[in-house]
Image (cartoon, rainbow, N blue to C red):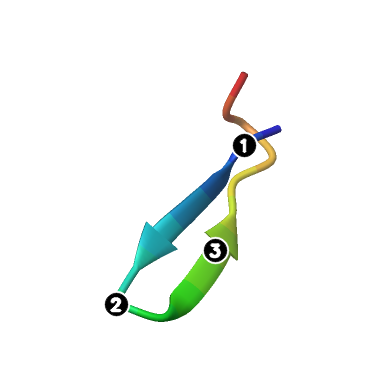
Amino acid sequence: MEPEFRSGDIIIVNPHAD
């Protein structure tokens, strides 16, 4: 599960990411 960095500072954790 890798964190996806979006909107500059907001970290969205993607449970579907390997």
Considering the numbered disc 2 on the image, is that residue within a helix, a strand or a loop? loop
- Vertical placement of 5 versus 4: above or below? below
N-terminal-most mark, 3 or 1: 1
Residue at the spot 54% in from the left edge and 63% down from the top edge: 12
Residue carrying label 3 = 12
Quadrant containing the N terminus is top right
User: Could you classify mark 1 by the number of other residues whose Cα lies within 10 Å: few (under 14), some (14-19), or many (20 or more)?
Assistant: few
- Vertical placement of 12 versus 16: above or below? below
- Vertical placement of 17 versus 18: above or below? below
How far apart in space, not on screen, are marks 3 and 2 (Cα)? 11 Å
How far apart in space, not on screen, are marks 3 and 1 (Cα)? 9 Å
Residue type at mark 2? Gly
Viewer-nearest of labels 3 and 2? 2
Near-viewer residue (1 or 8): 8
Residue carrying label 1 = 2
Residue at the spot 69% in from the left edge and 40% down from the top edge: 15
Residue at the spot 46% in from the left edge and 79% down from the top edge: 10
Looking at the image, do the residues carrying marks 3 and 2 touch, with CB atoms under 8 Å apart? no
Residue carrying label 2 = 8
N-terminal-most mark, 1 or 2: 1
Whether residue 5 sits left or right of residue 15 in the image: it is left
Q: Position of residue 4 (x, y in %)?
A: 47, 51
Considering the numbered disc 3 on the image, is that residue within a helix, a strand or a loop? strand
Q: How many labels does the image show?
A: 3
Residue type at mark 1? Glu
Considering the numbered disc 1 on the image, is that residue within a helix, a strand or a loop? loop
